[in-house]
Image: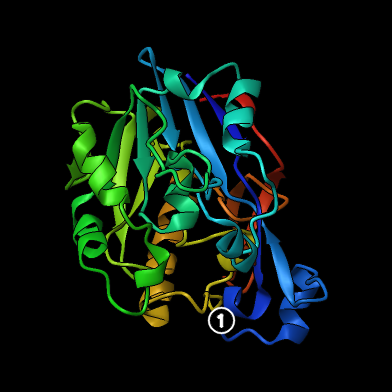
Amino acid sequence: MNLWSIEGNSQRLDGGAMFGNVPRALWSRWVAPDEQHRIPLACRCLLVKDLDGRNILLETGIGTFFEPKYKDRYGVMEDQHVLLESLQAAGLEHSDIDAVILSHLHFDHAGGLLTSWQEDKSAELLFPRARFFVGQEHWRRAQHPHPRDRASFIPGLNELLQDSGRLHLIEGDRHPWLGERIRFSYSHGHTPGLMLTEITGANGAGGVVYCADLIPGRAWVHLPVTMGYDRYPEKLIDEKRRFLADKLARDVRLFFTHDHGCALAAVAQDDKGRYHSSNEQQALAGLAL
């Protein structure tokens, strides 16, 4: 089994929204904004290659399903479906993926499931062989979204997933089809039922966890930093504290979806007990685990 960071289409979003109550004078030191006050964001996926003979993809990024006006609104940078190109660079086609695990169904995490936008033609699902894994609680949210995040869901995607006959809704920390090396935990501060996937190491230590929107990148490892998009920022901070303490204790590394310059990092603490990232890696290309 080995791990690959798989780049999807990148975005530029408003820095103030991405950093919540952090002043621009501070967050602009971490990530330089453009003239429209937007910061660069990756939509990075994690490929687990040859896990008991299966290829498992964690998330699919934003993709190219948006029609042009929404593509511009949400700052999608490339015209081509970058995820498919990145999979090819790792030696796979989307038809070679056996499972897609989705932390949640917001468009910047699930849009890459779909074919590229074409006028007068409905989007279709990619990954024809894959089983799709979504947390049960988040699925309920996606079926009946709140006005706060209704625009973050993709119209028609739920129906496509259901009609595929390959949708699996997860409760608990394991799924028998995925085996013992895939472990789940849950967070509710960003969106109800956000599912965090850990690829476990030997004896439960030394693994890698896909942080999704609990910790989108290095800057958000610092406990007080949250996004304006988060449902309950104080809850999210409490969840982060427990999450980081556990990962530090078990030497589990963090995989970031939205950090434009870092895919993987270890958790560290300074002499005041503040969390930060260390041993950062920009990309993974066949990391053995």
In depth, the one of 244 and 144 nearer the eye is: 144
Seen at 18% across and 52% down, the residue is 136
Residue 228 image position (x, y, % from top left): 51, 79
Tell me what residue is drawn at x 35 percent, y 24 percent.
Answer: 128
**What percent of the width, then of the height, locates residue 176?**
18, 28
> Hey, which quadrant is residue 33 in on the image?
bottom right
Report the residue marked by disc 1.
Answer: 20
Foreground residue among 206 and 99: 99
Would you call the spot at circle 1 few (<14 residues within 10 Å), some (14-19), or many (20 or more)?
Answer: some
User: Along the horizontal axis of the image, is 128 left or right of 169?
Assistant: right
**Position of 228 compared to 148: left or right?**
right
Does residue 24 appear in this view? yes
Q: Is residue 21 above or below residue 92?
A: below
Is 4 rendered above or below residue 172?
A: above
Coloring scheme of the render? rainbow
SS class of the residue under badge 1?
loop
Q: Is residue 85 above or below residue 236?
A: above
Q: Where is residue 121 shown, x and y percent of the image?
A: 43, 43
Q: Is residue 54 above or below residue 157?
A: above
Q: Residue at 54% of width from left, 18% of height from top?
A: 92
Residue drawn at (60%, 59%), measured in percent from left and top?
71
Amino acid carrying label 1: it is: Gly
Q: Position of residue 269 (x, y in %)?
A: 60, 62
Query: Does residue 249 show up?
Result: no
Q: Exactly how many numbered labels are in the figure?
A: 1
Of all residues, the one furthest to the top in this rendering is 53
Residue lying at the far front in this picture: please name it: 120
